[in-house]
Image (spheres, rainbow, N blue to C red):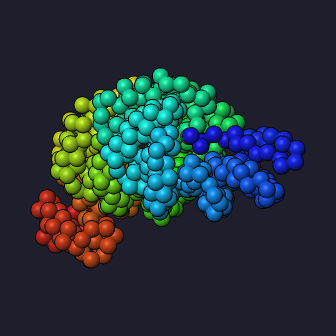
Amino acid sequence: LPFILVMPVHNADTKHHFDASDIPGEPKMGTELGLLAADRTPYHLPGEELARLVAAAEDAGWAGRADLARRATRAVLARDASPGDRVRARLAVIDAAGQALGALDETFAYAMADAEGDPALQAAVRLRTAWKHNLSDGDPVRSRDAAAEAGVLARSGGDQVAEAMALTVRARMGRILGDPDAEEILAEALALPAPEVPLGMRNAPQYLAVRHALFDDRNADARRQLLVLLPAVRRTGSAEDVFEVLRSLTEVELRRGRCAAATAHARDALELTVEAGLSPGPAWYLAALAEAMGGGFARAAGYARRGIQASEEEHDQVFLSRGLYVLGLVELATGEAAKAVTTLRRVAELEAAQQVVDPSILRWHGELAEALVLADAPEEAADLQARVRTTALALGRTSVIAALDRARGLCLSAQGDADAAVALLEDTAQSFELLELPLERARTLLALARVERRRRRRAPARAALAAAAEVFARAGAAPWTELAREPSPCPSPGEGAGARPPGSLTEAETRLAVLVAQGASNQEAAAKLFVSVKTVEARLTRIYQKLDVRSRAQLATTLRLG
């Protein structure tokens, strides 16, 4: 496969063997030197010139330099190149494109046509087609099928590295699709011979094993393996390989409650993206995630929006979902429940279109259920929890179930069963502690404080807030620490002015009641709460019935009296 960085270039006069890998961390320079060597090759040595051009194209693909890859490939195609050389040059253009594979259909078609009759080359093309089906098309079924075809071709061509990578893609797609055989397929890939440092990290079996450890909450194991991989890929890997390891380190450190370490890795990943010219969507997602937990909510939202825009422009469905997830998380944390519902519903729609079954990969389900409760839609939240819980139980996704239980506790509280809500949230906090997920435990304690405060048990509410604040502070989760130090994790408008929301109202009803009591019209309240006027009218009718009032003036008086 043309993933290998070591590409020979011969000096036309001395026949000295030049290797781009002799320049550590400078694949771009190797590409430029290869192009220069081709340009200086005497005209009577067309074979050597062509070899140098192909090598330069492959170096550019490895370096992620789309401009240099296209330049070298145009030169190859303008010469009397063999089908194999044309395929390798075109694959370099594909490799250099990063996440932006959606616009390369013609390149794929020409590469597959030129590869006809050569199983190893066909395997290389089909393997990249599998990546495209996942990243750009959002279709894991087609990706899995293309990878299976690539594996057969690679085995026929005697390329065990390509066969291992094809099995890895099948295992990755199998995990997404909830295939119980995914782990066996990954084990088969790991059993094949592979380089000490995996080439093409994203689809190497060793790296997917780390990702599965992360999905399964074996965070200490994942971190240990990543710290072995990081120096190795810094020495011999591509910029994309280094980014992938930094990405996983960021995510695993956040799961372990080490926000400072996660932020440092995310910063390195962003700097690498800028320096190497990688696709920006994944880096902005990572920066947003680290900022949402350990920096500031406003900056996190800004980074997430940049990542969403970049992923939309590159038709990257995978990281579009992730950027939207972080934005929805921030909106939920800052009390913008209606916005969070809209954002996280979009994540749900994207994952449904991508046929994602396993809920442990991108864990948005609990957040959407919580947002639905806060947006006064507990029935919809309960339906979502029940639907996802069935899948999570079947696949053994314990932490996903715990996140659903946190949302279910809030749902029980909204439906008037405070005792059951408190019991469930206390058990859920204990579950997260056993899973060694401190930030999730602290978020559950915030939910517990909200429920206790709603039923006017101030001492237990303060105790839950204090415990949450301690965990957040120890983890370096600055914005969440501030939330835990407020009088309420999600204070209702007007509470600071002395109004105390009646216990019979939901949080969404309380927010509306306060706005109306302060003089807001139905249209103004709808705009501030991001709901329709009809929703405001229906909700206001319920408020009047619950509080036994008939006018805005009576409502204001009732709120003042608590």
- Can residue 278 be seen in this snapshot? no
Kindly give the residue lying farthest to the front in the view shown.
Answer: 44
Residue occupying the point 36% across, 59% down: 343
Residue occupying the point 64% across, 49% down: 58
Left or right: residue 69 versus residue 505 is right
Q: Position of residue 384 (x, y in %)?
A: 22, 47
| Image vertical order of residue 352 relative to residue 212, above or below | below
Left or right: residue 535 versus residue 441 is left
Q: Quadrant of residue 438?
A: top left
Q: Quadrant of the N terminus?
A: top right
Left or right: residue 396 versus residue 545 is right
Left or right: residue 52 versus residue 158 is right
Q: Nearer the viewer, residue 107 or 63?
A: 107
Residue occupying the point 33% across, 58% down: 346
Q: Nearer the viewer, residue 511 or 407?
A: 407
Q: Quadrant of residue 437?
A: top left
Q: Nearer the viewer, residue 316 or 261?
A: 316
Q: Position of residue 34 (x, y in %)?
A: 75, 52
Q: Quadrant of residue 521?
A: bottom left
Q: Position of residue 363 (x, y in %)?
A: 37, 43
| Image vertical order of residue 293 relative to residue 520, above or below | above
Q: Position of residue 385 (x, y in %)?
A: 23, 43
- Can residue 114 be seen in this snapshot? yes
